[in-house]
């Protein structure tokens, strides 16, 4: 199925004032329950990201897991979980970051990335770039290389794209 941006946009729900007043939340749950459209998005992300040379896909909790696992399977790559603080059971490293709403901590197991391995970071949404930068810091702490980023949605006005180096690919821009 050929990627149809208009069709994908038509199922992403805009929810005003969530999680706080003045924020327009982009709800992807209608997209996820539609296997044809969800598959179309994963196929298009895989197509666009196939030009990059990488060993692992790192998905950011929680919706980054959804797209990251699908991409890792489709592209036959390993998958790395990047979780919020206190969720991983083994030895871990952490990186603090600021969201639009709070200060958070992202963690990764110490053995998730071997030195020199190349990693693609995936999440559902790029806003200010803080979460993606924290993910980048985690990969670098273990001497891995971030080759790029893949997002379903980018909120362009928030400037996250400009904070990231390397390939940044977003299917939809708002």
Image: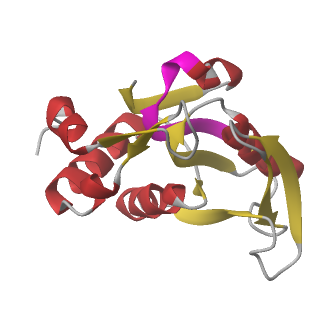
Above or below, 142 relative to 48:
below
Seen in the image, is 164 located left or right of residue 65? right
Rendered view: 51 above or below 29:
above
Q: Dividing the image into 4 quarters, which one contains the C terminus?
A: top left
At x 68% / y 24%, what residue is drawn?
165
Q: Which x, y percent locates residue 42?
A: 32, 50
Q: Is residue 125 above or below residue 90?
A: above
Q: On the image, which quarter does residue 93 sit in?
A: bottom right
Q: How many marks?
A: 0
Rendering coords of residue 116 (x, y %) = 77, 49
Instruction: Answer left or right for 29 relative to 52.
Output: left
Q: Main secondary structure of the magenta part?
A: strand
Occupied quadrant, residue 44:
top left
Tell me, yes or no, if residue 142 can be seen here: no
Instruction: Using the image as rendered, state which of residue 162 and residue 102 is in the foreground.
Output: 102
- Please check the rendered image and state whether residue 149 is part of the magenta-colored stretch, yes or no: yes
Query: Between 26 and 18, which is closer to the camera in this rendering?
Result: 18
Report the front residue among 60 and 103: 103
Instruction: Determine the residue located farthest toward the bottom in the rendered image.
Output: 89
Q: Describe the colour scheme in one phrase.
A: secondary structure
Image location (x, y in percent) of residue 59: 58, 56
Q: Which residues are magenta?
A: 146-157
Give the residue drawn at x 52%, y 55%. Answer: 64
Position of residue 81 relative to residue 23, above or below, is below
Task: Specify whether residue 87 is painted magenta.
Answer: no
| Residue 43 in the image, given as x and y percentages of width and height | 27, 48
The structure residue drawn at horizontal position 55% and vertical position 35%, both measured from the top left corner, is: 126
As drawn, the residue found furthest toward the front would be: 21
Q: Can residue 158 be seen in the rendering of this structure?
A: yes
Which residue occupies the foreground of this view, 106 or 21? 21
* x 64%, y 65%: residue: 81
């Amino acid at each position: 199925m050929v990627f149809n941006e208009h069709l994908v946009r038509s199922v992403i729900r805009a929810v005003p004032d969530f999680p706080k007043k003045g924020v327009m939340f982009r709800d992807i749950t209608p997209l996820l329950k539609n296997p044809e459209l969800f598959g179309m998005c994963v196929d298009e992300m895989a197509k666009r990201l196939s030009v990059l040379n990488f060993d692992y896909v790192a998905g950011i909790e929680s919706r980054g897991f959804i797209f990251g696992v699908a991409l890792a399977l489709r592209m036959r790559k390993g998958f790395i979980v990047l979780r919020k603080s206190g969720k991983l059971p083994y030895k871990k490293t952490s990186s603090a970051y600021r969201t639009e709403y709070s200060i958070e901590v992202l963690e990764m197991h110490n053995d998730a990335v071997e030195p020199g391995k190349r990693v693609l970071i995936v999440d559902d949404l790029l806003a200010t770039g803080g979460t993606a930068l924290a993910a980048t810091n985690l990969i670098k702490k273990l001497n891995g290389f971030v080759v790029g980023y893949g997002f379903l949605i980018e909120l362009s006005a928030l400037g996250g794209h400009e904070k990231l180096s390397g390939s940044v690919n977003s299917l939809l821009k708002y």
